[in-house]
Amino acid sequence: MKLFGTAIILAGGKSTRMGFDKALMKIRGKPIVEIIIQQLRAVFEDIIVVTNKSEEFTGLDVIVTEDILKGSGPLGGIHAGLMLSKSKYAFLAACDMPVISPDYAKYMMETAAKYLPHAVISEKGDWIEPFHALYNKDLAYDIKTNVQSGKYKIFDVIREKYIVKISEKKVREYSPGLDIFINLNHIKDLEEFKTSMEAGGIDSALL
């Protein structure tokens, strides 16, 4: 099995704070999920979209799947994506995080190839970011075990695993404003993001 080549987009959230399906919100006239896919194509051959509304993603050149572990939130989406991953490591993105840094993704892959950890994740202050990260396909088993034990956080899964953390300082070399961690949860977030884009305030150009 090849080390890299697969990216997973989680698009199964209920979007209760946004008021409509976040994966379908538009930026520059295009659904956000299409913008994310275009950016991922610069690095990854196989893209998996995990969603509970598969009918909304027809016509895209991606693999569309749904949770196997029902009712387990984002962790169930990660599990479903890893189960279908054609590579040992899969890159994780979210449908409400529109900025992808292909160069940073490549750096993360170089790091994973060097250390062969269970995951490569980024630090942001005192926090660890679960997205824009690489996860080993083998974690699918651990995720299932955690869900069966009533644990639904990815951090519970990787707590005792071999993890490589990339410092915020290093992340900023690729995304100076940490735009890769921008999360559009509310209409206000979407409007502010669009305004920042038009003003040239986003440091990763969207395709």
Image (spheres, rainbow, N blue to C red):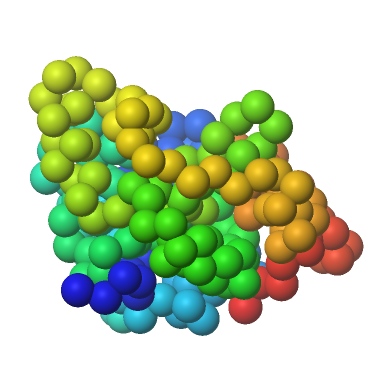
User: Is residue 115 left or right of 152 when viewed as pictured?
Assistant: right
Split into 4 quadrants, where in the image is the N terminus?
A: bottom left
Q: Is residue 194 visible?
A: no
Residue nearer the viewer, 116 or 72: 116
- Check the image and report above or below for 195 versus 107: above
Q: Name the residue located 16 percent from the left edge and 56 percent from the top edge.
A: 83
Residue 77 position within the rendered picture, expressed as x and y whole percent measured from the top left: 27, 46
Residue drawn at the location 55% of the way across and 35% of the way down: 128
Examine the rendered structure and indicate whether residue 56 appears above or below residue 74. Answer: below
Q: Residue at x 35, y 80 (%)?
A: 45
Residue 95 as seen in the image, left or right of residue 13: right
What is the residue that sits farthest to the front in this orientation?
115
Residue 177's x, y, as percent? 79, 51
Q: Nearer the viewer, residue 167 or 44?
A: 167
Specify whether residue 177 is in view.
yes
Where does the C terminus fall, quadrant-wise? bottom right
- Left or right placement of residue 123 versus residue 12 in this view: right
Of 144 and 99, which appears nearest the observer?
Answer: 144
Residue 87 appears at what percent x and percent y? Answer: 26, 69
Choose top left, top right, bottom left or bottom right for residue 47: bottom left
Depicted 22 relative to depicted 88: above or below: above
What is the residue that sits farthest to the right in this orientation?
Answer: 199
| Residue name at image x 26 percent, y 64 percent | 88
Q: Nearer the viewer, residue 66 or 104?
A: 104
Residue 37 point in image, percent of width and height: 45, 71
